[in-house]
Amino acid sequence: METTPAMGRRQAIALGGGAALATTAMAGCATTGDGGGGGTTAASSSPTTGEQVCVLSPEVTEGPYYLDGQLVREDITEGKQGFPLELAVTVVDYADGCAPLAGENVAVEIWHCDAWGYYSGYTEASPGGQVPAEDGEGDEDSFLRGVQPVDGEGTARFRTIVPGWYSPRVTHIHLKVHTEGEVDTTYEGGTTVHTGQLLFSDAFCAEVAEREPYSEHVLELTAIEEDQVYREAQSAEGDPDSMVVTPAPVTEGTPEDGYTLAVVVGVTPEESASGGGGGMAGGGGPGDGAPEGATPPEQP
């Protein structure tokens, strides 16, 4: 297989979804050439072409709901209702042939809304449409947020739920990659080397929206092509479709048993913005698209 030509810094990485793709997405890099210093390609498949690619993840806004100082933990559910989701995020270094970016001070941070579109820290903000009141499960400042250091293969794993949605966004998960910080009960200091989002496919969103508890939120779905972050990737001349993921059900035809999703995130640590591991660095400030009543928190 020929090495895929390098793409621009803000262009997209291929994302692999579900158990069927987990082996591929977690495989790291595949060496090409004569075996003596040949080129490499990340062993993850493009959802549009199926080809092996080695590209960078798109840098996009962190949005208006980022909260600093989240707990280092694998399970971020805190009792929130919704379909279970096992998420594996493998970080690779694009500048080093997409080799896994491992080390005790490398960590992945994720955050997302609950099944009805509420974010912890912003439970008074309306997700739009006809929606029940936030259910009060979990800590109102930390549910569905967490940080995990990567293992020796550059992979961080989380147990969470499939997110819901809010106006005017498609269902999504936010993520950051941090390096050189200190891992304790929280992740402190260091540098944020990537800020991105995973966007869930239209077909997957439509399937989930028909089932409880998601169906209790009566709000028209936003199509991927109308999503502001998808369009942001387009304007950066990236491949926005490579941001789109489709989790795979653990049991075929039974979403209630949960889903799995494996993704690969390509970063260039030496080109990242400097700043604290929990701060605004690397992803820009709050973006548009916040539910009514949302106010960004003060940042240190």
Image (cartoon, helix red, strand yellow):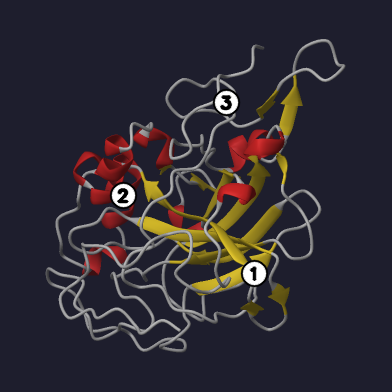
> How far is the residue under mark 1 from the one under mark 2?
35 Å
Indicate the position of residue 103 as horizontal and vertical percent values. 79, 58
Classed neighbour count for the residue bearing mark 2: other residues with Cα under 10 Å, few (<14), some (14–19), many (≥20): many
* Residue type, mark 3 in image: Val
Indicate the position of residue 140 as horizontal and vertical percent values. 41, 88
Residue depth check, mark 1 versus mark 2: number of the one nearer the observer: 1
Sequence order check: which comes first, mark 1 or mark 2?
1
Q: Give the residue at x 27% y 53%.
A: 170
Q: Quadrant of residue 177?
A: bottom right
Indicate the position of residue 182 as horizontal and vertical percent values. 72, 75
Look at mark 1 in the image and give the residue it sits on: 190
Identify the disc placed on residue 205: 2
* Residue type, mark 2 in image: Cys
Residue depth check, mark 1 versus mark 3: number of the one nearer the observer: 1
Q: Give the residue at x 64% y 69%.
A: 190
- In this orientation, which residue lies closer to the viewer: 75 or 65? 65
Classed neighbour count for the residue bearing mark 1: other residues with Cα under 10 Å, few (<14), some (14–19), many (≥20): some
Indicate the position of residue 149 as horizontal and vertical percent values. 70, 65
